[in-house]
Amino acid sequence: MKPTRFEGIRTAAVHAGEEPNPLTGASAPDIVMSTTFLINPDVSFSANLLTEETPFAYTRWGNPTVSQLEQKLAALEGSEACVAFASGMAAITALLFRILKAGDHIVMSDVTYAAASELANDTLPKLGIEISRVDTSDPENVRSALRSNTRLVYLETPTNPILRLTDVAAVATMAHEAGALVAVDSTFATPIALQPIALGADFVIHSLTKYICGHGDALGGAVCGSQQEMALLRPMAVHLGGILSPFNAWLIMRGAATLPVRMHAHEENALTLAQYLEGHPQITRVIYPGLPSHPQHELAKEQMANFSGMITFQMRDGLAAARVFSTKLQTIHYAVSLGHHRSLVIYIPTEDMLKTSFRLTTEQEASYRHFAGDGVFRFSVGLEDPADIMADLDQALAEIE
Ligand SMILES: *Cc1c(COP(=O)(O)O)cnc(C)c1O
């Protein structure tokens, strides 16, 4: 089923993919937990022959609740289709394995979500796939890295954890001229802030675990793209098996319905907190795309319709401060993940990231440190009252020399 188009993104968030159950009249979506479906003996079982019209047969191939979520996500991203996965990493793995084969080349941002970076650095070369890691915040670096066998350019904007941006339209134009496809991990931006398909990207990747679910209670992932590309990706999802549970799909669908209003509130809170931190004597640096002090604020204003709720900040002795935060913060949880209704903060030491996740050249390390210094607090500003978030930070900061 093609996603229905809606005029406004709030209406799409609420209604796309959903309609009352014609049998029961239920207004809210059902959770269909059945793993198996009664089928017609003439329908093929092969994942390679699945089409949009294939009836449901087995939940690893397709499920009514998961399919409703996929339609909602496609409507939000303005893409023709979507494939949902068990996690963001399952989505990334399936896309890389679907697009790349031995002898191919991928150009990938030198800084991405750590597990994506480790997967690319450790696993792709073993499969005979060549990889160039470049600082994609300068599109010229992408241009220089493109080769005749480049199949995919992989971006993340804003990138986790340093909030550096990439000009998606500029990179997409270059990549397409060279015959390569473009994937954007848009987890930090969400479809409310960034519309990568409209900017020319071929694939949008999400960790649904973050803003789209929004409540910190379900892992999920997705890739959005054309009907043709998603039809090719579906068998990879079926074969790798990292498919989304219908229960998680239902929870994420419920979260996605309020995504536009939540992102509005996340942005409002984040701007207030970013300004507060920027004025705080113990904070040495604040990076937020919505602040004029962000090195790429002009690109942020041009490319993003919302600055999202992610801030990074730096302190003189980050690790010592992190120890205090982890015991003294109350409203804000000292924990990984992001995009939840609850504020979360975590310290990410630069040295650790360089040792474990990234393999940066001297020049790339300088760019990383330009945004991250010796380490950043990655602050996912939640939906609490901003005054309470500030008061919590104030009392914890007062405990730090
Ligand atoms: C969390 C995250 C992922 C991985 O998602 P999971 O759902 O945890 O597998 C990928 N990309 C970004 C930018 C993330 O923040």
Image (cartoon, rainbow, N blue to C red):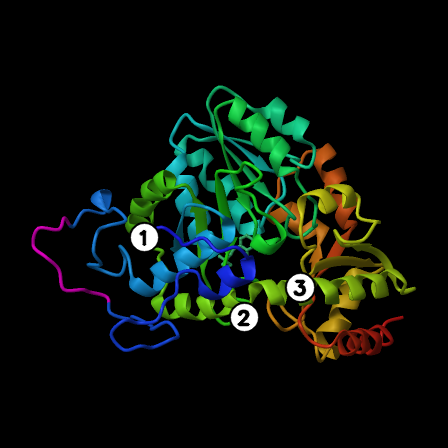
Badge 2 crowding class, 10 Å Cα cut-off, few under 14, some 14 to 19, many 20 or more, is some
The correct choice, above or below, for 395 with respect to 319 in the image is below
Depth-wise, is mark 1 or mark 2 nearer the camera? Answer: 1
Query: Considering the numbered disc 2 on the image, is that residue within a helix, a strand or a loop?
Result: loop
The correct choice, above or below, for 217 with respect to 350 in the image is below
Depth-wise, is mark 2 or mark 3 nearer the camera? Answer: 3
Q: Which residues are magenta?
A: 35-44
Which of 240/50 is in front? 50
The correct choice, above or below, for 359 with respect to 57 in the image is above
Q: Which residue is mark 1?
A: 1
Name which residue type carries label 3. His
Q: Residue at x 26, y 54 (%)?
A: 61
Q: What separation in Å lies between label 1 and label 3 (alpha carbons)?
A: 30 Å
Question: Percent position (x, y) of residue 56?
Answer: 22, 59
Disc 2, disc 3: CB below 8 Å?
A: no
Query: Considering the numbered disc 3 on the image, is that residue within a helix, a strand or a loop?
Result: helix
Q: Is mark 2 within 8 Å of ligand 1?
A: no
Q: What separation in Å lies between label 2 and label 3 (alpha carbons)?
A: 18 Å
Name which residue type carries label 1. Met
Q: What separation in Å lies between label 1 and label 2 (alpha carbons)?
A: 29 Å
Question: Percent position (x, y) of residue 30?
Answer: 33, 73
Badge 1 or badge 2: first in the primary sequence: 1
